Amino acid sequence: MTTFKFHNTNIVDVHRGDPMFVLSDGIAIADRASIQISENCPDRYRNIIQDCFERGWIEPLARMYDHEATFDTLKNNE
C-alpha cells in the first residue's frame, strides 16, 4: 500500500480583482502582476495576445506567501 504525505502550501494565488492584487504606497498604485510584450514582438502576435487577454484566456496572476497576504490585509485595514 502506498501512502502519501500532503504538504499544505503557504503560497496564495492572487487574481486581478482581488484587493491584494493592487500595490499602493499611499501615492503610487500598481498591479502586483502583469504581462509585458517586447517592442520586438511582431504586430500579428501582439494582436493575438491582446485578443486572448481581452477574452480572458490569458490573465495576470500574482503569487505571494500567505504571511505576506496576512500582513498586507492588516496593513490595509489600519
Image (spheres, rainbow, N blue to C red):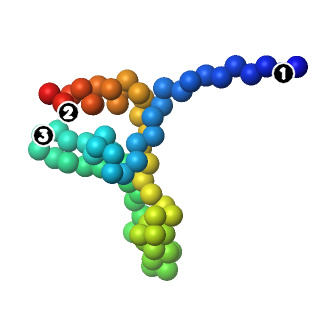
Count neighbours of disc 3 (C-alpha within 10 A) and say few if under 14, some if 14 to 19, many if 20 or more: few
Give the residue type at disc 2. Asn
Residue where numbered disc 2 is placed: 76
C-alpha separation, residue under disc 2 versus residue under disc 3: 10 Å
Indicate the position of residue 55 as horizontal and vertical percent values: 46, 69
- Residue 2 shows in this picture: yes
Answer whether labels 2 and 3 touch (C-beta < 8 Å).
no
Give the residue type at disc 3. Gly
C-alpha separation, residue under disc 3 versus residue under disc 1: 52 Å
- Against 7, residue 44 (above or below) is below
Give the residue type at disc 1. Thr
Q: Quadrant of the N terminus?
A: top right
Label disc, if present, on residue 33 of the rendered structure: none
Count neighbours of disc 1 (C-alpha within 10 A) and say few if under 14, some if 14 to 19, many if 20 or more: few
* In front: label 3 or label 1: 1
- Mark closest to the chain's N terminus, 3 or 1: 1
Does residue 75 appear left or right of residue 61 in this picture? left
| Foreground pick, 75 / 25 | 75
Answer whether labels 2 and 1 touch (C-beta < 8 Å).
no
- Mark closest to the chain's N terminus, 2 or 1: 1
Q: Secondary structure at mark 3?
A: loop
Residue where numbered disc 1 is placed: 2
